[in-house]
Amino acid sequence: MSHMHTELATPAPLAPGAMRVVPLGGLGEIGRNMTVFEFDGKLLIVDCGVLFPEEHHPGVDLILPDFTPIRDRLDDIVGLVLTHGHEDHIGGVPYLLRERGNIPVIGSKLTLALLAPKLKEHRLKDVPMHVVSENDVQSFGPFECEFVAVNHSIPDALAVAIKTAAGVALHTGDFKMDQLPLDGRITDLRAFARLGEAGVDLFLTDSTNSEVPGFTTAEKQITPAIDAVFARSKKRIIVASFASHIHRVQQVLDAAVKHNRKVAYVGRSMVRNMQIARELGYLKVPDGVVVDSIDAAPPEQMVLMSTGSQGEPMAALSRIANRTHDKVHLEPGDTVLLASSLIPGNENAIYRVIDGLTKLGANVVHKGNALVHVSGHASAGELLYCYNIVQPSNVMPVHGEIRHLHANAALARQTGVPNTIIAEDGYAVDLIDGHASIAGAYDVGYVYVDGSSIGDVTDSDLKDRRTLAAEGFISIIAVIDSTTGKIVSGPEIHARGLAEDDSVFDAIHPKVVAALEEALADGARDTAALQQVMRRVIGSFAGRRLRRRPLIVPVVLEA
């Protein structure tokens, strides 16, 4: 686990009649979204997602929100509201339910259906699940929740208005205002206006595209671009997308029918999610178009719908690019369509995959050279509309990196919002008498999932891993007679990951021995102190002679 250290004091207990909002993830990053609302001694959580690791997180599988501020209050949680089914909003749910398995989970039909396999994988049973739809109003403890339809890149997304005696908080979740959505389900601005008329005290808004002027392109406008790719492709087509992007898969299925092609799903999550979407009626699959085998038709009549659009190392597309996929082997002339945007931090991984595919002879089509993807988030023009419709008293931008939060707050101020709050993960924002302000901050940070380990890996561990990868490794082992204080064996010096042979250390070996003997002569017997002596000598040598700063592991054994 890593921790952020803030200058703000730990917040005092919440004043009677006030509502507190504490984001535990999603502010300052694109991922691990989680917000805790507190009122009258009870907690309501909105979303619990994961953040995917970047290159400077070697070996890390997932990054979770930090549950520390609520860990001793798990029994106070009255519900977990999920706005939609993307990983950065639901991926952390099993880890929270490991700590208390009977937290009521509230979400739309599709969202809970996508969550169910995750709970099964974590062997979580009998989790209370409450299906809600737009226009539903339900109470959970002292929180009355009204659910509002919003449009996003996955069906069944919901905003939630949280009503308490302290005031009303409206959380948009991820949303945009596509006026021609593929499923016909638009963001319910009438509900936003109605809530605004009644009074929204705190508006928490999606900030991802706040720097993008104008309006987000409608999903339907990319259909011609996808159709053009199919029309000019003479061999097999591989389309990579998020495994949850049901709208995009629908467009691919429709294009396949038009161009007389079959579609096979590649990737476990793609197969699972599309089966769920089809069974629930969110994906309309024409008869005979989806096949089980990637070889069900000649290459010129096949489309593979794959995961891995973000360059994930273990996803199908990366393995195809690296020629390590056990079934799919790319041939020159194949077309690869990356029907997704670049999530910040993933650019290098994605371009490596594109380079690998191009080297294998594929024609790679991506957002950089064709209109084959549109964002699922509201741009600046849409946010301005929302602020003018809702006319909130206070705005707290959420879901975005720091620059996105500031750009979103600037938009709110332009429309006359009297109070905007730029918060960070762990900040406590109190709503008292209609005014929101920062009341302090909890010390929170990244929680790393590394294999079966959760929260045990620290930033220091990751630094060591990065050093191992970039600078190499040197081990030094010496055996000391604990009675006489003499060196019995060693020091033996071995290196890995350095261009030089171990013989390069012959010149420094006498100096290590001399430094150890001097320390022993001065009465040093503590193995930790002796190890530091060896570390200093070798470290100085490596920096001066080898121009490197390797990870040095000294070991002193007592005989």
Image (cartoon, helix red, strand yellow):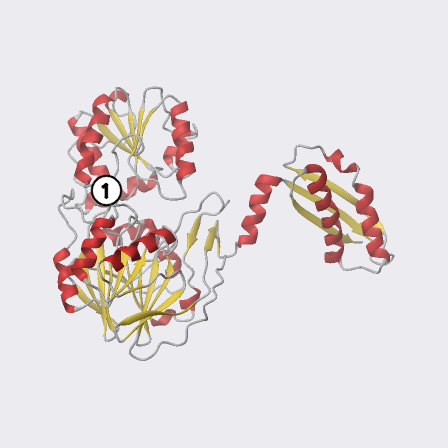
Name the amino acid, label 1: Ile
102, above or below 468, in the image = below
Residue 326 in view (yes/no): no
Element assignment for label 1: helix
- Give residue 514's position: percent from left, percent from top: 84, 48
- Give residue 136's position: percent from left, percent from top: 16, 62
- Give residue 504's position: percent from left, percent from top: 75, 35
List the residue tagged with mark 1.
Answer: 246
Q: Is residue 87 left or right of residue 134?
A: right
Q: Is residue 430 left or right of residue 524?
A: left
- Image point (69%, 37%), residue name: 546
Circle 1 Cα neighbour tier, 10 Å, few/some/many (<14 / 14–19 / ≥20): many
- Give residue 289's position: percent from left, percent from top: 19, 31
Q: How many marks?
A: 1
Residue 351 in view (yes/no): yes
Q: Is residue 480 left or right of residue 204?
A: right
Q: Is residue 479 left or right of residue 16?
A: right
375, above or below 255, in the image = below
